C-alpha cells in the first residue's frame, strides 16, 4: 500500500477548488463550474468506496496509515482509518456530490465561490475523520469554521449575519479549551500521536480536566443541551446545501470525537462523567423534542430534531457497550442521510414557494405526489420506523441504555414517542389536509435532479434499515477492541 | 579591533545616510533616486548581515558593549527586510500626498540604524543611544504629512509621551548603575546582589519604558492616536519595525543580566501580557477606523509575544520571535490592502469603506479574508501556528491561567476580525477602488498572502531558523 489513498481523499477536493478558483474570471458558463465540482466530488466518492473495498474488517488496527514528519520534533502528519472512522469518510464523500447537485435552484449568485467553499469544506471534513494526530485533528476541526461561516454569511437568509457570527464564536469558544488540552497532553506525555497515546495512556489525575476541555468543544459541536442554541439559527439561515452539510457531517465530527478521543484517551474520566452525559442527553432528547413540536418553521423543526437525535448518539456512546456505540454510529450515519434528505425536501418546496412556514403548505399530496412519497420515507426514517436505518440505531442505543440505567432508558424512549409525534404532525400539516393556499396549485413536482438526489438518499436509508450488516461488520471489531481497552484501563485503575 | 567587520552593516548604513544627505542637498529633484538608493542600501545591508554575522559564534565588541550573535543578526535581517518592504510600497502613497521627499527614506534609514544598535546592544548606554536615534527619526516620520493637523498631532503626542517614557527608562538605568557599578549587561549579571530591592525598582522602570515602546497595556495610550494620525505608510512602519527592536532588547535585558530575578519580573510580564491581550481585543470592537483598529489589534498581538517572553525559557523566546515574524508578514499584507483602498487620489480608511469589497475586487478581498482569519488565529493559516507555538511554550511552564486567558481573548478578537469580513462579504457594495496599483504593492500583498496560506506546508523552516537562538 504505497499509494497515499487517504491524503488523496483529503487533497482532491481542494485541488478541484483551486481549479475552480483560477477558472472563475472567464466563466459565465456556470454549468462548467458545477460539472468540475461534481466530477471532483464523484471521483472522491468512488475513491472512498474503493477504500471501503480494500478495508480489512477483521482488525481494529489503523489501516492505510501515512506518517510523515511535519513540524520537526513536534508534530507528525499522521492519517489512518479504522472501523469507526471509515463510515464517516464515506458519508462525507457521499453527501458532498448530492449537495453540489442540489445547488441548481437555491444558489443564484456567486455559484463559483459557493462550490469552492463546499469543496474546501469536504477537504477539512475528511481530514477530521482521518487524522491520527491531535494537532492535525484540531487543525481540520477548526479550519472547517471558515468555509461554513462564509456559506451561512454570504448565501444565507435574512438573519444570516447574526447566525454566522453565533455559529463561529460558539464553536471557536468551545474549541480553544481543547487546544489547551491538546498542548497539555503533549506536555504530559511528549506526543500528540493518537496511536501512541492509546498505548501510553494518560495519567488518571489529569484525565478529568482534559476530558472536560475536550467535552467543551464537542458539546458545542454536537450540539448538546444547553449549548445547542447556535444550531437552529445556523440551520434556518444557511442555504439548503449548507444545512445539509451542517446536519449530515459537521455534527458528526463531535460524535466521532467523543468515541475516538473522550473514550479512547480518557477512559477513567469518561466513567466519572457518564452521569453528566446521561443527564444532558436525556434533557436534550425530551426538551428539544418538545420544542420541535411547537415550531412553525420547517427547518427549525428539523434542526431541533437533530439536537434530539444527537442526544441519542451521546447517550449511546457513553453506555460504553458494544450495542450502544454501534447504535450511535449507525444513528449518526442514518441521521446524516435522513436529515440531509429532510433539509433537501424543505429546500425543494422553499425554492418553489419561498416560504419555510408550515402554515403556508397543506394538502399538496395531490399536486406533487412524488415529493410526498419521498418525504414520507424520510419522515418515517426520522422517527425510527422499523425497516429504516433510523430504527436500527435507536433500537441498539435503547437496548444498551436499558442494560445500564433503566430510568434513563425509559425517559429516552419517551423521546422516541414525542419524536414520532412531531415528525408525523409535520408531515400531516404539510402534505395532507385541505388545500387552502391556492398559490400551491402552481407547484411542479420534483425535477430530475431533485428526484435523483432524494432517491440516492432513500436507497441507503431503506437498505441499511433492512440489512445493517455491512455497517455493523465494518465497525464491530474496532468497537469491541475499544471497549476492551476501556474496561481494562478502568479496571486497572481501581 | 579584531572583529570590526562584524559591525560593517552599521558602518555601511551610516555612511550611506551621510552620502544620501549630501546628495539630497546638492542634487535637485533627487527624491526618486534617493528613494531607490535607500532601497538598495537596505537590501545590501541585509545581505551583508546575512553573510557576515548570521553564522558566527556570539562575539562582543567595544569592551563588551556590543554583542553580535544569532539573535541580533536574525532580528536585524527582519528589521531591514521589513523596512525595505515598507519603503518599497509607500512611494505611491507619498506621491499622492505630495510628501515624496528626500527626508523620508533617510529618516527610515536612520531609525533602522538606531534599531540595529538597539538590537546589538549589550550595555545600557549603547541601548539608550540606539533607542534615542530611532525615536528621534520616528517623531519626525509621524509628523511627515505636516500639512495635516492629525499628523502633526500624532507626532507631538508621540514625542511628549515617548520622551516621558525615555526619562523613566533612563532613571531605571541610573538605579541599576548605582547598585551594580556598571552599565554592561555581562558585568551586571555577575555583580548584583539578589537581595537588593533597588535593582528591582530599576528593572521596573526600564520595563515601563520598554513597554511604552512596544505599546503594551497600560502604556499603550499613544498608539491608537499616533497610528491613526500618521501617514499610512509610516503607520505600517510603526506597527512592525520598532517593535522588533524593542522586543529584542526586552529579551536581552531580561534574560542576560536578570534571569536570576525571574520571580520579580515574570509577574510584571504576565500582567502586561494579559492586559494587552484582553484590552487590545475588547477595545478594538468599537473602532470604526481601520488604522485605529489595527492599533488595538497590534496591542493585542504584542500581548501574545510577551506571553512567550514571560515563560523564562528558551522555547518561549523562540516562540516570541516566530510570533513577531509571522505577525510582520500578516501586517504587511493587511497594510498593502489598506494602501490599495484608493479612489480618485483619496485614500479610504474607515471600516465601512470596505463594504461589499468582494464584488468589485474579488482577489483583494480574498487576500484580506485570509489575512484577517490568520490574524484571528484560525487554522490552518500562519497566525494559528504563531499562537500555537506561544501557547505550547506557555503551557510547558504550567502557566495555564495565561494560556486560557490568551485563548479566550482570541475568541473576543475573532469577533472584530469577523466584523470586517462581514462588511466585505455580506454587505452591499460601494463604488470600486482604483485597480492600477503599483506593481510592488500587488507583489507584497500576493507574497504575504501566499506565505500565510502556505505556511502549514513548510512549518519547519521557520522553526529551524529560530531554533538557533540561544540566550540562556
Image (cartoon, rainbow, N blue to C red):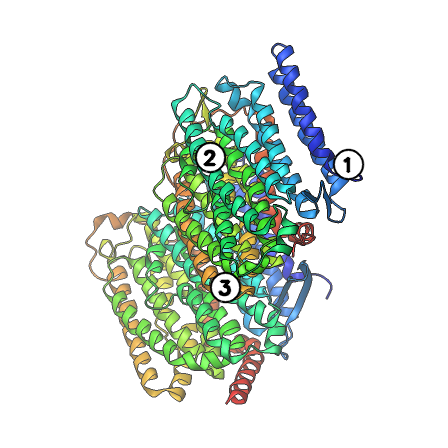
B187 lies left or right of B414 = right
The residue that label 3 is drawn on is: B399
Residues tagged by mark 3 and mark 2 found on one chain of the structure: yes
The residue that label 1 is drawn on is: B5
Q: If you read the primary sequence from the N terminus, does the residue marked by circle 1 or circle 3 appear first?
A: 1
Q: If you read the primary sequence from the N terminus, does the residue marked by circle 3 or circle 2 appear first?
A: 2
Q: CA distance from mark 1 to mark 3?
A: 43 Å
Numbered disc 1: secondary structure: helix
Query: Crowding near pointer 2: few (<14 within 10 Å), some, many (20+)?
Result: some
Numbered disc 3: secondary structure: loop
Residue B146 coordinates in the image, percent (x, y): 45, 20
Q: CA distance from mark 1 to mark 2?
A: 34 Å
The residue that label 2 is drawn on is: B163
Q: Camera-side residue: A102 or B77?
A: B77
Query: Up-down: is B357 above or below B458?
Result: above
Q: Quadrant of the C terminus of chain B?
A: bottom right
Of marks 3 and 2, the one in the foreground: 2
Numbered disc 2: secondary structure: helix
Amino acid at each position: 500500500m504505497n499509494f497515499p489513498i487517504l491524503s488523496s481523499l483529503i487533497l482532491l477536493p481542494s485541488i478541484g477548488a483551486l481549479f475552480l478558483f483560477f477558472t472563475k474570471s472567464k466563466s459565465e458558463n456556470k454549468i462548467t463550474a458545477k460539472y468540475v465540482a461534481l466530477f471532483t466530488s464523484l471521483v472522491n466518492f468512488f475513491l472512498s468506496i474503493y477504500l471501503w473495498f480494500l478495508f480489512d474488517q477483521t482488525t481494529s488496527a489503523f489501516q492505510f496509515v501515512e506518517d510523515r514528519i511535519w513540524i520537526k520534533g513536534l508534530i507528525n502528519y499522521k492519517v489512518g482509518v479504522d472501523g469507526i472512522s471509515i463510515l464517516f469518510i464515506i458519508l462525507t464523500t457521499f453527501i458532498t456530490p448530492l449537495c453540489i447537485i442540489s445547488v441548481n435552484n437555491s444558489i443564484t449568485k456567486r455559484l463559483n465561490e459557493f462550490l469552492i467553499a463546499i469543496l474546501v469544506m469536504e477537504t477539512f471534513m475528511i481530514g477530521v475523520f482521518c487524522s491520527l494526530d491531535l494537532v492535525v485533528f484540531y487543525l481540520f476541526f477548526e479550519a472547517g469554521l471558515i468555509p461554513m461561516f462564509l456559506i451561512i454569511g454570504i448565501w444565507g437568509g435574512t438573519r444570516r449575519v447574526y447566525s454566522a457570527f453565533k455559529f463561529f464564536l460558539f464553536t471557536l469558544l468551545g474549541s480553544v479549551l481543547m487546544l489547551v488540552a491538546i498542548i497539555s497532553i503533549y506536555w504530559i506525555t511528549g506526543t500528540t500521536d493518537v496511536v501512541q497515546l492509546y498505548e501510553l495512556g494518560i495519567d488518571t489525575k489529569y484525565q478529568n480536566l482534559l476530558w472536560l476541555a475536550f467535552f467543551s468543544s464537542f458539546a458545542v459541536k454536537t450540539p448538546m443541551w444547553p449549548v445547542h442554541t447556535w444550531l437552529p439559527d445556523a440551520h434556518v439561515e444557511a442555504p439548503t446545501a449548507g444545512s445539509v452539510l451542517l446536519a449530515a457531517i459537521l455534527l458528526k465530527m463531535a460524535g466521532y470525537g467523543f468515541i475516538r478521543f473522550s473514550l479512547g484517551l480518557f477512559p477513567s474520566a469518561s466513567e466519572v462523567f457518564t452521569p453528566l452525559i446521561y443527564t444532558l442527553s436525556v434533557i436534550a432528547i425530551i426538551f428539544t423534542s418538545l420544542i420541535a413540536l411547537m415550531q412553525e418553521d420547517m427547518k427549525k423543526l428539523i434542526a431541533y430534531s437533530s439536537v434530539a437525535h444527537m442526544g441519542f448518539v451521546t447517550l449511546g456512546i457513553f453506555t460504553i457497550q458494544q450495542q450502544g456505540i454501534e447504535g450511535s454510529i449507525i444513528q449518526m450515519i442514518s441521521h446524516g442521510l435522513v436529515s440531509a434528505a429532510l433539509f433537501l425536501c424543505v429546500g425543494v418546496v422553499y425554492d418553489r414557494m419561498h416560504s419555510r412556514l408550515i402554515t403556508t403548505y397543506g394538502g399538496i399530496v395531490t399536486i406533487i405526489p412524488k415529493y410526498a412519497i419521498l418525504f414520507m420515507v424520510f419522515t418515517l426514517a426520522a422517527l425510527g420506523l422499523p425497516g429504516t436505518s433510523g430504527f436500527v440505531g435507536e433500537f441498539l442505543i435503547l437496548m444498551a441504555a436499558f442494560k445500564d440505567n433503566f430510568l434513563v432508558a425509559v425517559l429516552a424512549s419517551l423521546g422516541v414517542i414525542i419524536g414520532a409525534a412531531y415528525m408525523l404532525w409535520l408531515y400531516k400539516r404539510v402534505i395532507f389536509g385541505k388545500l387552502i393556499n391556492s398559490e400551491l396549485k402552481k407547484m411542479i413536482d420534483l425535477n430530475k435532479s431533485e428526484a435523483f438526489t432524494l432517491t440516492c438518499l432513500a436507497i441507503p436509508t431503506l437498505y441499511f434499515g433492512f440489512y445493517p450488516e455491512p455497517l455493523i461488520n465494518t465497525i464491530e471489531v474496532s468497537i469491541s477492541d475499544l471497549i476492551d481497552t476501556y474496561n481494562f484501563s478502568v479496571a486497572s485503575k481501581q | 579591533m579584531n572583529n570590526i567587520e562584524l559591525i560593517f552593516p552599521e558602518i555601511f548604513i551610516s555612511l550611506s545616510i551621510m552620502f544620501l544627505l549630501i546628495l539630497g542637498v546638492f542634487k535637485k529633484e533627487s527624491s526618486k533616486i534617493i528613494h531607490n538608493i535607500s532601497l538598495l542600501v537596505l537590501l545590501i545591508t541585509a545581505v551583508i548581515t546575512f553573510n557576515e554575522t548570521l553564522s558566527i559564534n556570539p562575539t562582543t565588541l567595544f569592551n563588551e558593549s556590543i554583542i553580535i550573535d544569532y539573535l541580533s543578526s536574525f532580528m536585524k535581517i527582519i528589521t531591514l527586510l521589513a523596512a525595505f518592504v515598507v519603503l518599497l510600497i509607500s512611494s505611491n502613497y507619498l506621491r499622492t500626498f505630495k510628501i515624496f521627499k528626500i527626508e523620508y527614506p533617510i529618516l527610515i534609514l536612520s531609525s533602522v540604524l538606531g534599531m540595529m544598535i538597539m538590537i546589538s546592544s549589550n550595555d545600557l548606554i549603547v541601548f539608550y543611544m540606539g533607542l534615542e536615534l530611532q525615536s528621534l527619526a520616528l517623531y519626525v516620520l509621524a509628523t511627515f504629512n505636516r500639512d495635516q493637523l492629525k499628523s502633526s498631532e500624532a507626532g507631538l503626542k508621540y514625542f511628549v509621551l515617548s520622551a516621558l517614557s525615555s526619562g523613566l527608562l533612563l532613571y531605571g538605568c541610573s538605579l541599576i548603575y548605582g547598585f551594580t557599578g556598571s552599565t554592561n549587561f555581562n558585568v551586571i549579571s555577575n555583580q548584583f546582589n539578589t537581595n537588593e530591592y533597588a535593582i528591582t525598582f530599576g528593572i521596573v522602570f526600564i520595563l515601563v519604558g520598554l513597554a511604552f515602546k512596544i505599546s503594551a497595556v497600560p502604556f499603550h495610550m499613544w498608539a491608537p492616536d499616533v497610528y491613526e494620525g500618521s501617514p499610512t505608510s509610516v503607520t505600517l512602519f510603526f506597527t512592525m519595525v520598532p517593535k522588533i527592536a524593542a522586543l529584542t532588547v526586552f529579551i536581552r535585558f531580561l534574560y542576560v543580566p536578570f534571569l536570576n530575578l525571574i520571580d520579580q519580573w515574570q509577574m510584571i510580564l504576565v500582567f502586561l501580557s494579559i492586559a494587552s491581550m484582553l484590552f487590545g481585543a475588547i477595545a478594538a470592537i468599537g473602532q470604526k477606523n481601520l488604522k485605529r483598529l489595527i492599533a488595538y489589534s497590534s496591542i493585542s498581538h504584542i500581548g501574545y509575544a510577551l506571553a512567550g517572553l514571560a515563560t523564562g525559557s528558551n522555547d518561549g523566546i523562540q516562540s516570541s520571535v516566530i510570533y513577531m515574524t509571522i505577525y510582520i508578514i500578516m501586517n504587511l499584507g493587511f497594510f498593502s490592502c489598506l494602501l490599495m483602498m484608493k479612489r480618485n487620489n483619496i485614500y479610504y480608511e474607515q471600516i465601512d469603506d470596505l463594504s461589499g469589497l468582494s464584488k468589485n475586487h474579488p482577489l483583494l478581498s480574498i487576500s484580506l479574508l485570509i489575512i484577517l482569519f490568520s490574524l484571528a488565529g484560525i487554522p490552518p493559516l500562519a497566525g494559528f501556528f504563531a499562537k500555537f507555538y506561544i501557547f505550547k511554550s506557555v503551557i510547558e511552564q504550567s502557566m495555564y491561567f495565561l494560556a486560557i486567558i490568551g485563548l479566550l481573548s482570541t475568541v473576543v478578537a475573532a469577533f472584530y476580525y469577523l466584523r470586517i469580513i462581514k462588511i466585505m462579504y455580506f454587505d452591499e457594495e460601494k463604488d470600486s477602488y482604483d485597480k492600477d496599483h503599483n506593481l510592488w504593492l500587488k507583489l507584497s500583498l500576493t507574497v504575504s498572502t501566499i506565505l500565510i496560506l502556505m505556511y502549514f506546508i513548510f512549518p519547519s523552516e521557520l522553526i529551524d531558523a529560530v531554533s538557533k537562538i540561544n540566550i540562556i
